[in-house]
Image (tube, grey):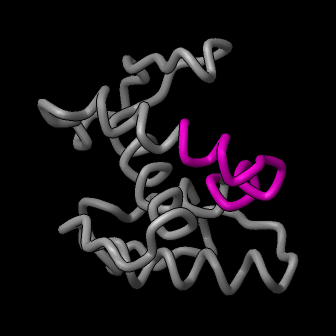
């Protein structure tokens, strides 16, 4: 779901804005994200209106790099859920939690 949300967000942004956001997430997460916690404890200067969980930021960063530098391997096992979200995005589907396979990647099931 977070990857789908990232695709919707990026659809309204310029490539420069996507790059700026993606690189900011990389800087915020340079010492790692607590992706196991659902707590929204990370704040971004470019999106000051809300806080994000570590998993949300990982998904945003992954989707962002797929847009700005798809040749980079981020060493995140998010390719399968990303492709599923991308397919749903291109189909124009409204997504709910039931659209995602909870066994797809246990720690990234919400992506």
- Left or right: 104 in relation to 84: left
**Left-right relation of 42 to 98:** left
Where residue 3 appears, as percent x and y from the top left, is 55, 61
Q: Quadrant of the N terminus?
A: bottom right
Q: Residue at x 45, y 58 (%)?
A: 110
Q: Using residue 102 as the reference point, say whether residue 32 is left or right of it.
A: left
Question: In the figure, residue 28 lies in which quadrant?
Answer: top left
Magenta-drawn stretch contains 28: no
Foreground pick, 100 / 79: 79
**Predominant SS along the magenta part:** helix
Of residue 72 and residue 102, the one placed in the foreground of this image is: 72
Toward which corner of the image does residue 47 lie, by quadrant?
Answer: top right
Whether residue 88 is situated above or below residue 21 in the rendered picture: below
| Number of numbered tags placed on the structure image | 0
Task: Estimate the x, y position of residue 67 in percent, counting from the top left.
Answer: 57, 67
Q: Is residue 62 above or below residue 43?
A: below
Furthest residue toward front? 16
Instruction: Examine the structure image and report whether residue 19 is included in the region drawn in magenta.
Output: yes
Q: Residue at x 56, y 83 (%)?
A: 84
Residue 21: percent from left, percent from top: 54, 37
Residue 43, relative to residue 104: is it above or below?
Answer: above
Q: Which residue sits at x=47%, y=44%?
A: 22
Q: Position of residue 55 (x, y in %)?
A: 36, 45
- Residue at point 24% right, 60% down? 107
Query: Would residue 47 appear left or right of 20 to someone viewing this image?
Result: right
Q: Which residues are magenta?
A: 6-20
């Amino acid at each position: 779901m977070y990857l789908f949300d990232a695709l919707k967000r990026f659809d309204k942004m310029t490539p420069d804005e996507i790059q700026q956001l993606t690189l900011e997430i990389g800087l915020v997460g340079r010492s790692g994200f607590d992706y196991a916690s659902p707590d929204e404890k990370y704040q971004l200067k470019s999106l000051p209106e809300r806080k994000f969980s570590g998993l949300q930021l990982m998904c945003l960063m992954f989707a962002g790099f797929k847009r700005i530098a798809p040749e980079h391997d981020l060493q995140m096992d998010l390719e399968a859920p990303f492709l599923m979200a991308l397919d749903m995005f291109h189909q124009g589907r409204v997504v709910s939690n039931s659209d995602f396979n909870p066994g797809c990647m246990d720690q990234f099931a919400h992506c």
